Image (cartoon, helix red, strand yellow):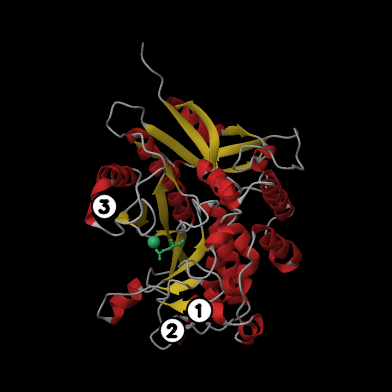
Amino acid sequence: MTAEALMMACVSDIAGMIRGKGFPAAALPARVARGVGWVPTNVQITCFDRIAPTPFGSLGDLVLWPDPKSEVRVDFGDGGPVERFILGDVTGTDGSPWSCCLRSMLRRALADLEAETGLTLYAAFEHEFMFKGGGPAGAAFSLDGFRKRQRFGELFLGALRQAGLSPDSFLREYGRDQYEVTIDPAAGVAAADQSLVLRALARATAARLGDDITFTPLIGPDEVGNGVHIHISFRDARGFPATYDAGGRHRLSRTAGAFAAGILKYLDRIVAFTAPSVVSYTRLTPHRWSAAFNNLGDRDREAAIRICPTSARDEAGIARQYHYEVRACDAAASPHLQLAALVLAGLAGVREGLETPTATTDDLSLLTPEALAARGLARLPTSLAEALDRLERDETVRSWFPDGFVEVYLAHKRGEIAMLEGMDAAAVCAAYAAVY
Ligand code: GLU
Ligand code: MG
């Protein structure tokens, strides 16, 4: 008997999961032409696999359109099945836009940014994750810690390379059996696609080795967090770097500065998209090297947006390397929705002509809310419920998204919160570690 090679058409959903349907790999051209059936209420399947309140009920049909540019084919060479999946956008059966398609939401936001600024956004998602039931604390950044997971790292980076990503580094992070992987930037939607592919291939590699990993934002109440840091830079229409300006405040170009200012102005309302789990808000507390305030930092790992270091000695080299990272993000989110929210807020900052913020250098946790406000700063929401309330109350931010989307999102996330009722902090962390 000859086995039938299968592949899967996938979307990135509100729960930050990769869901979709499988079909014979040989049928890919036909599937690209006629799509794969999809269901509106699937968007309300929470990370705990129970369905949150849904406005769609059992009604309606959608089409998932596999995008050949996003096809992943990775042969681990171990005799197991070839890892094969493809991402896509979702529309109505008549081709009309679907208000909850996160990938097309990102594509539209990027197109608006490009049309209004002439700049293309490049992004790289840096991920931290942990091996579950893992080793003792210690061994941070050590050769022993590196060697312990070197086999994993080599297979994983090889898989990323086969999938068309360009790995930059793999390292033993500070937390318990925690590792970090960075990749080179990609333009536009591809950057979010690559984050999804990276998460999927990390899990695929772990499965091949019998390891169990998690990207959960927080594995236990007193543990180190797993962040996603979204590195952002811009290039102009000729492909020249457009993030750096030697004369700008903090050496940021006018557009890059206004874009960062927009993200920071609206961060307390969009963090519900970028750090969307209950445990995300324990990670986003002071002195965890994540982000607890809406501040810009110059090489400060406690800032919501951190300007990253450069190593070049010449102006052209510095301009090429110059960029910042948004740290108030984690892997409970869809990378497409995360980046869409950042682009929409950043673009609002550009439209409003916001000035580049002044980078903070002090410990903001020592300041009163009044002292923070006097400097245009605020503590980020301290719970998912509060983050959702702030999003709901802001008509402007809601208007950036397709009609009805924010209502669906709020119902999804409030449903998720209700599913955790009665659990203590450790049980909530365990519930998320089991699914992310
Ligand atoms: N683990 C930290 C976080 O939750 C980040 C540590 C670092 O790489 O600076 O974002
Ligand atoms: Mg790190």
Compared to residue 308, the image places residue 334 above or below, namely above
- Is disc 1 in contact with disc 2, using a CB cutoff of under 8 Å? yes
Q: Secondary structure at mark 3?
A: helix
Residue 257 - label: 1
- From this viewpoint, is residue 357 visible? yes
> 427 or 374: nearer the eye?
427
Residue topped by disc 2: 250
Q: Give the class, few, some or many, for how many residues have Cα within 10 Å of label 3's Cα (few <14, many ≥20).
A: many
> 69 or 406: nearer the eye?
406
On the rendered structure, is 218 left or right of 314? right
On the rendered structure, is 118 left or right of 54? left
- From this viewpoint, is residue 399 visible? no
Distance CA(mark 2)–CA(mark 3): 35 Å
Along the polypeptide, which appears first: circle 1 or circle 3?
Answer: 3
Q: Secondary structure at mark 2?
A: helix
Question: Could you say where residue 63 lies in the image, as x and y percent from the top left?
Answer: 62, 37
